Image (cartoon, helix red, strand yellow):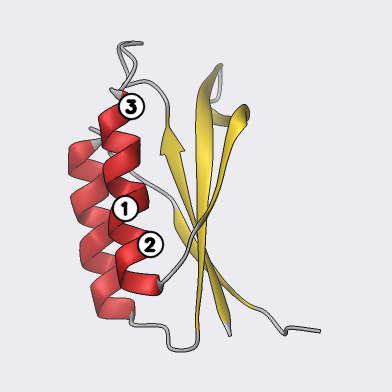
């Protein structure tokens, strides 16, 4: 079983918030394809990383999770690129972990 997490920014690089409709669209797309989704949207997570040796960049994000038996890497690669364009990101994180249900 694979757990896929998508980290979506709440704001573009200029600080403009993305419309709620964009998040609902992603939720609906994933729920339709995978039969369910978990969203962590109440308390945005904060991502920090070094933009350069002297600057730190931060993002407020929400996390969407789906689980699937088969990991279709080609589909995920294309969907990640599509989301990066829709959310105006140079890099958008989509990560997968193997999980074992207990």
Give the Cα separation between the discs numbered 1 and 3: 12 Å
- Residue at 31% x, 66% y is 32
* Residue 6: % across, % down: 45, 52
Vertical placement of 92 versus 32: above or below?
Answer: above
For marks 2 and 1, give the CA distance: 5 Å
Task: Residue at 27% x, 35% y: name it.
Answer: 22
**Residue 86 position in % (x across, y down):** 19, 39
Pointers 1 and 3 in contact (C-beta within 8 Å): no
Pick the front one: 53 or 30: 30
Circle 3 Cα neighbour tier, 10 Å, few/some/many (<14 / 14–19 / ≥20): few
Q: Which residue is mark 1?
A: 28
Ranked by sequence position, the earlier of labels 2 and 3 is 3
Residue found at the far right of this picture: 102
Quarter of the figure with the N terminus: bottom right
Element class at badge 2: helix
Under circle 3, the secondary element is helix
Does 4 appear above or below 38? below
Between marks 2 and 3, how big is the CA–CA gap?
A: 17 Å
The reply to whether discs 2 and 1 touch (Cβ–Cβ < 8 Å) is yes
Tag 1's secondary structure? helix
**Local crowd at mark 1 within 10 Å, few (<14), some, or many (≥20)?**
some
Q: Which residue is mark 2?
A: 31
- Nearest the viewer among 54 and 4 is 4
Between discs 1 and 3, the one toward the N terminus? 3
Residue ID at (43%, 88%)? 70
Residue that badge 3 annotates: 20
Residue 38, horizontal then vertical, whole percent:
55, 55
**Res. 99 visible in picture:** yes
């Amino acid at each position: 079983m694979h757990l896929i997490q998508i980290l979506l920014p709440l704001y573009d690089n200029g600080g403009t918030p993305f419309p709620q409709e964009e998040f609902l669209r992603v939720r609906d797309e994933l729920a339709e394809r995978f039969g369910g989704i978990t969203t962590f949207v109440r308390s945005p997570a904060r991502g920090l990383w070094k933009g350069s040796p002297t600057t730190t960049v931060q993002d407020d994000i929400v996390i969407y999770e789906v689980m699937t038996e088969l990991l279709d890497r080609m589909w995920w690669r294309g969907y990640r690129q599509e989301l990066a364009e829709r959310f105006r990101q140079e890099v958008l994180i989509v990560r997968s972990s193997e999980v074992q249900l207990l």
